[in-house]
Amino acid sequence: MNHTNVVDVKAWIDTRPVSRFQWNVLLLCFIIIMLDGYDAAVMGFVAPALIEDWGISRAEMGPILGAAMFGVAIGALVAGPLSDRYGRKRILLWSVALFALFSLAGAVAQSPTQLALMRFLTGLGLGAVMPNCVTLVAEYMPERRKGVMITLMYSGFNVGSGLGGFIAAGLLSHYSWHSALVFGGVLPLVVLPFMIVMLPESAMNMVARRLPGEQIARALNRLGGQFTAETVFQLNAPPITRSSKVAQLFRHGYARGTIALWLTYFYGAVRDLPAERLAANHSPLRRAVAAAGGDDDRLVPARRPAGRDPCRYADGSRFGESRDCGNLFPRLFVPVVPGGDGFRFGGAVGADFYQRDVH
């Protein structure tokens, strides 16, 4: 092989089989999303104990539960531009550290206001984790496997929230509600060193940032390449522009799909707010089963629709569950299977719908 050849990184990845290294990337991101799922859902499990301990009303508990979702929304919006500039891995590490530390801080909060603030800051990290994990997996997977791999990764969220319910139930039966938040903060800190050592930076992002060829070659050689620092790496895609990344989501024919994905995401997010878990007559086990999806038929599109139109996904993910919303989008997707989740599966759709320069 002539190492001085010009190599298109994306085309090279697309032509290769999925290696053990790529499976490891998927597994590590699955674990990260699983921890994300636990921390996102944990307040729903501890809410009844917290209400009893602090003597507050359910109305006062509402801002605490909602604060994290506002943080998630903001974190998800700012994470993309930051990772484009500073790298996927770096922002992902900081995001995990952020939600871990503020989950621990929430355990020592002394008032509903303090806890709501800690949950908002926790949400910033939780929201930033999702787009970085999905982009990292998308940029390391061949095009033919990308959607499936991202869907597998996102299933970690339901695993985390479901198993987290059983974990929280066990902790609450022996300790106070603080223990569930401590668990949600300590575990990500334990995983963080493994992320530092094992998680790679995106080779495609390094090319876009014009980093030294030696770093790019080192990353691709872990996939089975035999490149050197003299290899010239490029991307057969439009260059990243300096304009606002959020604004790009509404240009070049993306506006309709962006609106569909956002509606799906926020419908699912609001629908998943754990208000039902506040009921005093719900046991911790009942709340855990609810989080795991035991009483919720969720939907996943069975294949990629023609044209990569997310409007066709949106109808079948979350809106498809609401009979009165069923006609909002064309019903052009294949029959579905239980276990999906519209607002998290939207990440897989988005990774397939948008071009690399607006990821």
Image (tube, grey):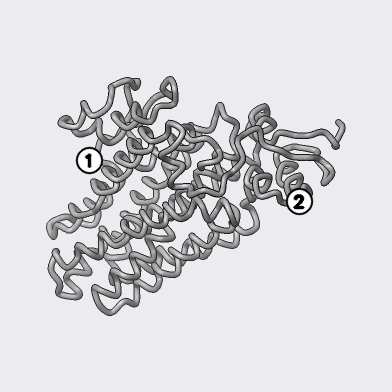
What residue lies at 65% left-to-right and 29% top-to-bottom?
A: 17
Q: State left or right for residue 258 relative to residue 89.
A: left
Question: Disc 1 on helix, strand or loop?
Answer: loop
Give the residue type that dot 2 points to. Pro
Name above or below for residue 269 compared with residue 298.
Answer: below
- Residue 86 appears at what percent x and percent y? 60, 57
Residue 255: quarter of image: top left
Q: Is residue 180 visible?
A: no
- Residue 345 appears at what percent x and percent y? 39, 38
Q: Is residue 103 visible?
A: yes
- Residue 91 appears at what percent x and percent y? 54, 58
Query: Disc 1, disc 2: CB below 8 Å?
Result: no
Give the residue type that dot 1 points to. Asp
Q: State left or right for residue 289 relative to residue 131.
A: left
Residue 322: quarter of image: top left
Q: Give the class, few, some or many, for how many residues have Cα within 10 Å of label 1's Cα (few <14, many ≥20).
A: few
Residue 197: quarter of image: bottom right
What residue lies at 59% left-to-right and 45% top-to-bottom?
A: 25
* Residue assigned mark 1: 295
Give the camera-side residue of 53 and 285.
Answer: 53
- Which numbered dot is residue 212? 2
The CA distance from mark 1 to mark 2 is 51 Å
Give the camera-side residue of 355 and 269.
Answer: 355
